[in-house]
Amino acid sequence: MVNPIVSIIMGSDSDLPVMQDAATILKNFNIPYELTIISAHRTPKRLVEFSENAHKRGVQVVIAGAGGAAHLPGMVAAISPLPVVGVPIKSSNSIDGWDSVLSILQMPGGVPVATVALNGAKNAGILAAQIVSVGNKEIRQQIIDYKNDLTAQVEEKIKRLENK
Protein backbone atom coordinates (compact mmCIF):
# COMPACT_ATOMS: atom_id res chain seq x y z
CA MET A 1 0.00 0.00 0.00
CA VAL A 2 1.19 3.52 -0.82
CA ASN A 3 1.68 5.78 2.19
CA PRO A 4 -1.08 8.37 2.55
CA ILE A 5 -0.26 11.98 1.70
CA VAL A 6 -3.62 13.30 2.90
CA SER A 7 -5.16 12.35 6.20
CA ILE A 8 -8.92 12.67 6.64
CA ILE A 9 -9.88 12.69 10.29
CA MET A 10 -13.20 13.20 12.00
CA GLY A 11 -14.44 13.47 15.55
CA SER A 12 -16.97 10.64 15.29
CA ASP A 13 -18.18 7.94 12.92
CA SER A 14 -21.40 9.95 12.62
CA ASP A 15 -19.33 12.44 10.58
CA LEU A 16 -18.48 9.82 7.94
CA PRO A 17 -21.42 10.50 5.59
CA VAL A 18 -20.11 14.08 5.19
CA MET A 19 -16.39 13.29 5.21
CA GLN A 20 -16.77 10.53 2.62
CA ASP A 21 -17.06 13.29 -0.01
CA ALA A 22 -13.42 14.29 0.63
CA ALA A 23 -12.32 10.68 0.28
CA THR A 24 -14.19 10.35 -3.01
CA ILE A 25 -12.45 13.41 -4.46
CA LEU A 26 -9.01 12.20 -3.37
CA LYS A 27 -9.71 8.76 -4.79
CA ASN A 28 -10.75 10.33 -8.11
CA PHE A 29 -7.44 12.24 -8.21
CA ASN A 30 -5.52 9.06 -7.27
CA ILE A 31 -4.16 10.73 -4.15
CA PRO A 32 -3.31 8.24 -1.39
CA TYR A 33 -5.23 9.04 1.78
CA GLU A 34 -6.14 7.59 5.13
CA LEU A 35 -9.45 7.93 6.95
CA THR A 36 -9.84 7.64 10.71
CA ILE A 37 -11.55 8.92 13.85
CA ILE A 38 -9.78 11.18 16.32
CA SER A 39 -11.89 12.88 18.95
CA ALA A 40 -10.41 16.08 20.39
CA HIS A 41 -12.40 15.57 23.58
CA ARG A 42 -12.58 11.79 23.97
CA THR A 43 -9.13 10.76 22.63
CA PRO A 44 -6.84 13.72 23.38
CA LYS A 45 -3.69 11.58 23.62
CA ARG A 46 -4.45 10.10 20.18
CA LEU A 47 -4.93 13.65 18.84
CA VAL A 48 -1.54 14.78 20.14
CA GLU A 49 0.26 11.66 18.85
CA PHE A 50 -1.33 12.05 15.42
CA SER A 51 -0.61 15.79 15.25
CA GLU A 52 3.02 15.42 16.29
CA ASN A 53 3.75 12.58 13.87
CA ALA A 54 1.59 12.81 10.73
CA HIS A 55 4.24 14.78 8.81
CA LYS A 56 6.88 12.20 9.81
CA ARG A 57 4.76 9.54 8.07
CA GLY A 58 4.65 11.57 4.83
CA VAL A 59 1.24 13.17 5.27
CA GLN A 60 1.20 16.57 3.55
CA VAL A 61 -2.31 17.85 4.34
CA VAL A 62 -4.88 17.11 7.05
CA ILE A 63 -8.62 17.39 6.44
CA ALA A 64 -10.36 17.51 9.82
CA GLY A 65 -14.12 17.40 10.18
CA ALA A 66 -15.99 18.06 13.39
CA GLY A 67 -19.39 19.11 14.65
CA GLY A 68 -20.60 20.88 17.74
CA ALA A 69 -17.72 22.58 19.56
CA ALA A 70 -15.50 21.39 16.65
CA HIS A 71 -12.12 21.66 18.34
CA LEU A 72 -10.47 18.94 16.23
CA PRO A 73 -9.18 21.05 13.30
CA GLY A 74 -7.86 23.83 15.52
CA MET A 75 -6.13 21.49 17.94
CA VAL A 76 -4.42 19.64 15.08
CA ALA A 77 -3.34 23.00 13.60
CA ALA A 78 -1.99 24.08 16.99
CA ILE A 79 0.32 21.06 17.17
CA SER A 80 1.07 19.98 13.59
CA PRO A 81 3.27 21.81 11.06
CA LEU A 82 0.94 20.63 8.27
CA PRO A 83 -1.79 22.66 6.58
CA VAL A 84 -5.18 21.80 8.05
CA VAL A 85 -8.46 22.09 6.17
CA GLY A 86 -11.40 22.23 8.57
CA VAL A 87 -14.84 20.91 7.69
CA PRO A 88 -17.58 22.17 10.00
CA ILE A 89 -20.29 19.53 10.32
CA LYS A 90 -23.91 20.05 11.25
CA SER A 91 -24.25 17.34 13.84
CA SER A 92 -26.96 16.19 16.21
CA ASN A 93 -25.54 18.36 19.01
CA SER A 94 -24.98 21.35 16.76
CA ILE A 95 -26.69 24.74 16.82
CA ASP A 96 -27.73 24.62 13.16
CA GLY A 97 -24.03 24.12 12.34
CA TRP A 98 -23.08 27.67 13.29
CA ASP A 99 -21.18 26.57 16.39
CA SER A 100 -19.07 24.27 14.23
CA VAL A 101 -18.47 26.94 11.57
CA LEU A 102 -17.39 29.56 14.09
CA SER A 103 -15.27 27.14 16.14
CA ILE A 104 -13.23 26.27 13.06
CA LEU A 105 -13.27 29.66 11.34
CA GLN A 106 -12.41 31.92 14.28
CA MET A 107 -8.87 30.69 14.98
CA PRO A 108 -6.42 32.96 16.80
CA GLY A 109 -3.55 34.58 14.92
CA GLY A 110 -0.71 32.14 14.35
CA VAL A 111 -2.90 29.03 14.19
CA PRO A 112 -4.58 29.03 10.77
CA VAL A 113 -7.19 26.53 9.67
CA ALA A 114 -8.48 26.74 6.10
CA THR A 115 -12.22 26.44 6.54
CA VAL A 116 -14.73 25.24 3.96
CA ALA A 117 -18.51 25.51 4.02
CA LEU A 118 -20.73 23.65 6.44
CA ASN A 119 -20.65 19.96 5.39
CA GLY A 120 -18.25 21.02 2.58
CA ALA A 121 -15.98 17.97 2.59
CA LYS A 122 -15.98 17.86 -1.22
CA ASN A 123 -14.32 21.29 -1.33
CA ALA A 124 -11.93 20.19 1.42
CA GLY A 125 -10.85 17.29 -0.79
CA ILE A 126 -10.36 19.62 -3.76
CA LEU A 127 -8.39 22.12 -1.66
CA ALA A 128 -6.17 19.33 -0.28
CA ALA A 129 -5.53 18.15 -3.86
CA GLN A 130 -4.63 21.71 -4.88
CA ILE A 131 -2.20 22.00 -1.96
CA VAL A 132 -0.55 18.70 -2.89
CA SER A 133 -0.43 19.80 -6.55
CA VAL A 134 2.01 22.59 -5.70
CA GLY A 135 4.76 19.97 -5.71
CA ASN A 136 3.21 17.46 -8.10
CA LYS A 137 2.70 18.36 -11.77
CA GLU A 138 0.59 15.25 -12.44
CA ILE A 139 -1.93 16.16 -9.77
CA ARG A 140 -1.84 19.80 -10.92
CA GLN A 141 -2.84 18.67 -14.41
CA GLN A 142 -5.68 16.64 -12.94
CA ILE A 143 -6.89 19.78 -11.13
CA ILE A 144 -6.71 21.74 -14.39
CA ASP A 145 -8.66 18.99 -16.17
CA TYR A 146 -11.22 18.92 -13.35
CA LYS A 147 -11.80 22.68 -13.60
CA ASN A 148 -12.05 22.48 -17.39
CA ASP A 149 -14.66 19.74 -16.96
CA LEU A 150 -16.64 21.97 -14.56
CA THR A 151 -16.62 24.71 -17.22
CA ALA A 152 -17.75 22.25 -19.90
CA GLN A 153 -20.60 21.04 -17.70
CA VAL A 154 -21.88 24.59 -17.19
CA GLU A 155 -21.52 25.41 -20.89
CA GLU A 156 -23.60 22.33 -21.72
CA LYS A 157 -26.29 23.46 -19.27
CA ILE A 158 -26.28 26.92 -20.87
CA LYS A 159 -26.82 25.36 -24.31
CA ARG A 160 -29.69 23.21 -23.06
CA LEU A 161 -31.35 26.18 -21.34
CA GLU A 162 -30.95 28.57 -24.25
CA ASN A 163 -32.20 26.02 -26.81
CA LYS A 164 -35.53 25.48 -25.07
Image (cartoon, rainbow, N blue to C red):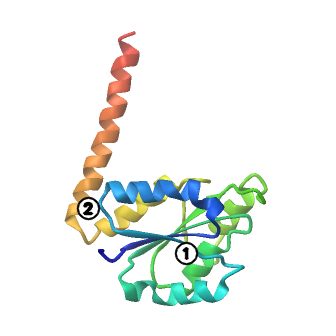
Give how far across and how far down residue 132 sits, in percent.
33, 69
Residue 39: quarter of image: bottom right
Q: Is residue 163 above or below residue 143?
A: above
User: Which quadrant is home to the C terminus?
Assistant: top left
User: Which quadrant is home to the N terminus?
Assistant: bottom left
Q: Amino acid at mark 1?
A: Pro
Separation of marks 2 and 1 at Cα, in angstroms: 24 Å
Residue 82: quarter of image: bottom left
Q: Amino acid at mark 2?
A: Ile
Task: Provide the residue designation for mark 1.
Answer: 112
Residue 98 visible in image: yes
Give the label, 2 or 1, closer to the camera: 2
Q: Is residue 36 rendered to the left or right of residue 106?
A: left
User: What residue lies at 59% left-to-right and 53% top-to-bottom?
Assistant: 119
Label located before the other in sequence (2 or 1) = 1
Q: Is residue 163 rendered to the left or right of residue 112?
A: left
Q: Residues within 10 Å of mark 2 (few under 14, many from 20)?
A: some
